[in-house]
Image (cartoon, rainbow, N blue to C red):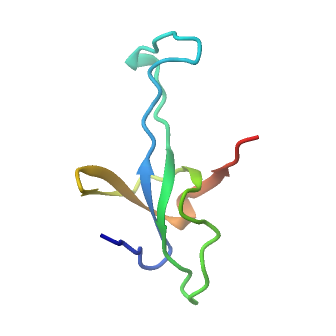
Amino acid sequence: MIIRPIGERVLLKHQKKETVTKGGIYIPESAQKEKKEGLVVAVGTFEDGKNLPLKKGDRVIYGGYQVDEIEIDEEEYIFVDFKDILAIVVED
């Protein structure tokens, strides 16, 4: 199934929280921060038809309070407005 967001929206696959540090220490649920990080699955366009400056596979940090959750093939995805995308995560 191909999903193409309409307008200035981005379809993300939410990245799960880490429960163990790199050193092997378990993080209790009470100490975990909500991680608002996702992987871009599909991208819409600006109103004038120009492409948004994101591409499939980008890892992003997003904010905002409004997301629309959907389930596709038993996987959870979210739609986020482009204005709520705060940054692209780039690995060194």
The residue lying furthest to the front in this view is 1
* Residue drawn at x 58%, y 66% as measured from the top left: 55
Q: State the image coordinates of residue 29 (x, y, percent, origin top left).
A: 38, 19
Location of residue 30 with respect to 77 vertically, above or below? above
* Residue drawn at x 48%, y 18% as measured from the top left: 20
**Viewer-proximal residue, 31 or 58?**
58
* Residue drawn at x 29%, y 50% as measured from the top left: 75
Q: State the image coordinates of residue 25 (x, y, percent, origin top left).
A: 51, 9
Q: Give the left or right position of residue 80, taking residue 2 as reference.
A: right
Q: State the image coordinates of residue 86 (x, y, percent, origin top left).
A: 62, 54
Quadrant hosting residue 50: bottom right
For the N terminus, the image quarter is: bottom left
The residue lying furthest to the right in this view is 92
Location of residue 83 with respect to 67 vertically, above or below? below
Location of residue 42 with respect to 92 vertically, above or below? below
The residue lying furthest to the left in this view is 74
Quadrant hosting residue 52: bottom right
Q: State the image coordinates of residue 42 (x, y, percent, origin top left).
A: 46, 67
For the C terminus, the image quarter is: top right
Instruction: Give the tally of numbered discs.
Output: 0
**Viewer-proximal residue, 65 or 76?**
76
* Residue drawn at x 44%, y 56% as measured from the top left: 12
Q: Give the left or right position of residue 63, taking residue 69 as reference.
A: right
